[in-house]
Image: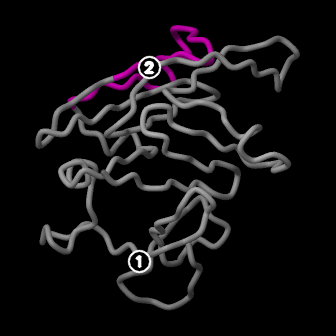
């Protein structure tokens, strides 16, 4: 987000940011967080040629995509459990569910996993399997098994000496993800 005090139609309200009003930018980055292109978010367009592409649009062109999704954006047909339901069932951290839908001959996989809160991912190329076990002992010193959907930790051998960043590599397509507190970069994979 780029903060601004200007008043025009492109300005958006983002309540979780320190500066609440600004321009929402969509950036295309590679695995080393180098920005190649950006676009100012202007909302949903009615004209399909001007609209920002969604996952089925990208899948029809052979471009794989992966990203987090807001639960309210998935529609009412997909019954994703709420935080209250998960806490009522006393679900352990690492619990996950997967849903697959076919939209315009593109399989869209939606995965929900419960860590501290439910996280929902949507992808056109990777799903829940294979589940990799990883030990995590942040709060108490007992090991927890958490779920890394089809990705493999690869940063120790590939990027030695980089602290604070987690580099993950998708096993199926060898696409690299750069995830840390400040960046969430994804290198597009074109066939």
| Residue 183 horizontal side relative to residue 1, left or right | right
Q: Is residue 159 above or below residue 53?
A: above
| Residue identified by numbered label 1 | 40
Q: Nearer the viewer, residue 157 or 180?
A: 157
| Residue 9 horizontal side relative to residue 156, left or right | left
In which quadrant of the rendered view does residue 112 lie?
Answer: top left
Q: How many marks?
A: 2
Q: Residue at image x 58%, y 21%?
A: 147
In which quadrant of the rendered view does residue 134 lie?
Answer: top right
Judge the density around disc 2: few (<14), some (14-19), many (≥20) Cα neighbours within 10 Å. Answer: few
| Residue identified by numbered label 2 | 129
Q: Position of residue 161 (x, y in %)?
A: 85, 48
Q: Is residue 174 above or below residue 188?
A: above
Q: Residue at image x 37%, y 39%?
A: 122
Report how far apart the C-alphas of labels 2 and 1 lie in the structure.
Answer: 35 Å
Q: Nearer the viewer, residue 73 or 13?
A: 73
- Magenta segment: does it hold 86? yes
Q: Position of residue 174 (x, y in %)?
A: 49, 40
| Residue 117 horizontal side relative to residue 26, left or right | right
């Amino acid at each position: 987000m780029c903060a601004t005090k200007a008043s025009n139609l492109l300005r958006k309200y983002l309540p979780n940011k320190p500066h609440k009003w600004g321009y929402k930018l969509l950036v295309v980055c590679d695995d080393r967080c180098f920005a190649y292109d950006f676009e100012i978010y202007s909302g949903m367009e009615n004209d399909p040629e001007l609209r920002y592409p969604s996952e089925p649009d990208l899948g029809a062109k052979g471009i794989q995509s992966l990203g987090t999704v807001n639960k309210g954006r998935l529609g009412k047909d997909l019954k994703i459990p709420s935080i209250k339901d998960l806490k009522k069932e006393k679900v352990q951290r690492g619990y996950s569910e997967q849903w697959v839908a076919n939209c315009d001959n593109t399989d869209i996989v939606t995965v929900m996993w419960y860590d501290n809160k439910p996280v929902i991912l949507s992808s056109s190329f990777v799903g829940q399997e294979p589940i990799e076990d990883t030990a995590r002992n942040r709060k108490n010193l007992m090991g927890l098994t958490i779920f890394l959907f089809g990705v493999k930790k690869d940063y120790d051998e590939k990027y030695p000496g980089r602290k604070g960043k987690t580099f993950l590599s998708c096993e199926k397509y060898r696409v690299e993800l750069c995830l840390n507190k400040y960046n969430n970069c994804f290198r597009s994979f074109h066939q």
